[in-house]
Image (cartoon, rainbow, N blue to C red):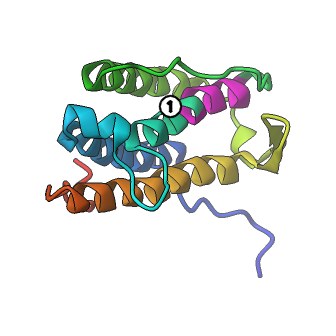
Amino acid sequence: MSSTAQVVITPDALLEHWQGHRRVTRRLIDAFPEDKLFTFSVGGMRPFSELAMEFLKMSVPTLNGIISKDWSSTGPAAPKTKAELLRLWDADTAEINRLWPTIPQGRFQERDVAFGQWEMPIYGLLWYIIDNEIHHRGQGFVYLRALGIEPPPFYDRS
């Protein structure tokens, strides 16, 4: 094994990967009927609106912590309508794009303790929040199918 570090993915490619998943999740949110987004669940799992809020409470707060090393940010308050949730989602997307280029050079390789509980390299933390969204988005796909609604294609990240 070589001691020379190799770049597997650039920061810009990682951001595009994440935003591609966020575009799928946004289409999933939009596919839900208004009332079912906030109430429907299967097997005691949380409604998808709560899962979407989990994503929003992790995205920008994580970037703020990465940039400032202050992990006290908590994210937005829960909306009451699908339109409000989609507005929050879009504002969050714009804020991610604004904050991303301000991540200090070399920070991706540093270890930190995010929110006082997750110690890992920053790149690992970012993969974790992306993986968490993908995992819970799968629940949303199941919910839509249980409601008789075809979910958006998971592979179309455009």
On the question of residue 128 being in view, the answer is yes
Residue lying at 80% horizontally and 44% vertically, measured from the top left = 110
Q: Position of residue 11 (x, y in %)?
A: 53, 44
Marks counted in the figure total 1
Q: Position of residue 155 (x, y in %)?
A: 26, 62
Say left or right for 29 vs 69.
Answer: left
Q: Is residue 30 above or below residue 68?
A: below
On the question of residue 106 being in view, the answer is no
Examine the structure image and report whether residue 35 is included in the region drawn in magenta.
Answer: no
Residue lying at 60% horizontally and 59% vertically, measured from the top left = 7
Q: Position of residue 115 (x, y in %)?
A: 78, 34
**Residue 83, located in which quarter of the rendered image?**
top left
Q: Is residue 3 above or below residue 119?
A: below
Q: Which residues are magenta?
A: 58-67
User: In the image shown, does 90 or 142 lie closer to the viewer?
Assistant: 142
The residue that disc 1 covers is 56
Examine the structure image and report whether residue 61 is included in the region drawn in magenta.
Answer: yes
Number of other residues with Cα within 10 Å of mark 1, as a class: few under 14, some 14 to 19, many 20 or more: many
User: In the image shown, does 6 or 140 lie closer to the viewer?
Assistant: 140
**Residue 31, located in which quarter of the rendered image?**
top left
> Given the current orientation, which residue lies at the most extreme bottom position?
1
Residue lying at 76% horizontally and 76% vertically, measured from the top left = 2
User: In the image shown, does 146 or 140 lie closer to the viewer?
Assistant: 146
**Residue 150, located in which quarter of the rendered image?**
bottom left
Say left or right for 69 vs 122.
Answer: right
Q: Secondary structure at mark 1?
A: helix
Q: Position of residue 105 (x, y in %)?
A: 69, 34
Quarter holding the N terminus?
A: bottom right
Q: Amino acid at mark 1?
A: Leu
Dominant secondary-structure state across the stretch colored magenta: helix
